[in-house]
Image: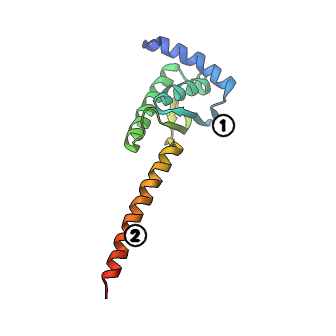
Amino acid sequence: MASWRLEENIQRDMEKAQEAVELYGGHVLKAPNRYEIRTGVVVAARFADKLRRTAFAVFGGVVPREEIVRATSELNRKIYEKLISMGVGKLDIVRITVEASVEGGRLVFGEPKIEWFIPHTALEKKLEECEKKMGEVRQKIEALLRELP
């Protein structure tokens, strides 16, 4: 069972961060001191862990871990609010990309880009609903046109 103690979570994240770097990369150097951090495709409920671990992997030797925790917490709160306003569910699939840099010893994140992957079956259902509605509208228009002299 996962621990909820901050110190144990940070240690686990640092271990997972090294694993993520070795397996996935998770970041791209865009310019000197400017990185693009990516979650990859994840279940929305897990985005925060992925971002924090990637931040530890990229900035672990550059800024104190407390700064990484602080900055990613603020970023995660911002992303969470965006996900809620978009209507993204906990089990929906997303990919999050954000630029990050170190400025004056502080970790600074740019505006996150959120991609929401909608299942094919959900799109088919919406399409069927739209086609049905369009058929109804078409019938009403044709009926109105027949009534005209």
State the residue at coordinates (52%, 38%).
94
Residue nearest the viewer, comparing 81 with 89: 89
* Circle 1 residue: 29
The secondary element bearing badge 2 is classed as helix
Identify the mark at residue 47; answer none if there is no mark. none
Name the kind of residue labelled 2 in the image. Answer: Arg
Disc 1 residue type?
Leu
* Residue ID at (37%, 70%): 139
Q: Residues within 10 Å of mark 2 (few under 14, many from 20)?
A: few
Nearer to the camera, 70 or 62: 70
User: Mark 2 vs mark 1: which is more N-terminal?
Assistant: 1
Instruction: Point out residue 76 in the picture as x, y percentages from the top left corner.
Output: 44, 32
Q: Is residue 84 left or right of residue 34?
A: left
Residue positioned 60% across, 21% down in the render = 17
**What mark, if any, has residue 138 been given in the picture?**
2
Q: Is residue 123 above or below residue 35?
A: below
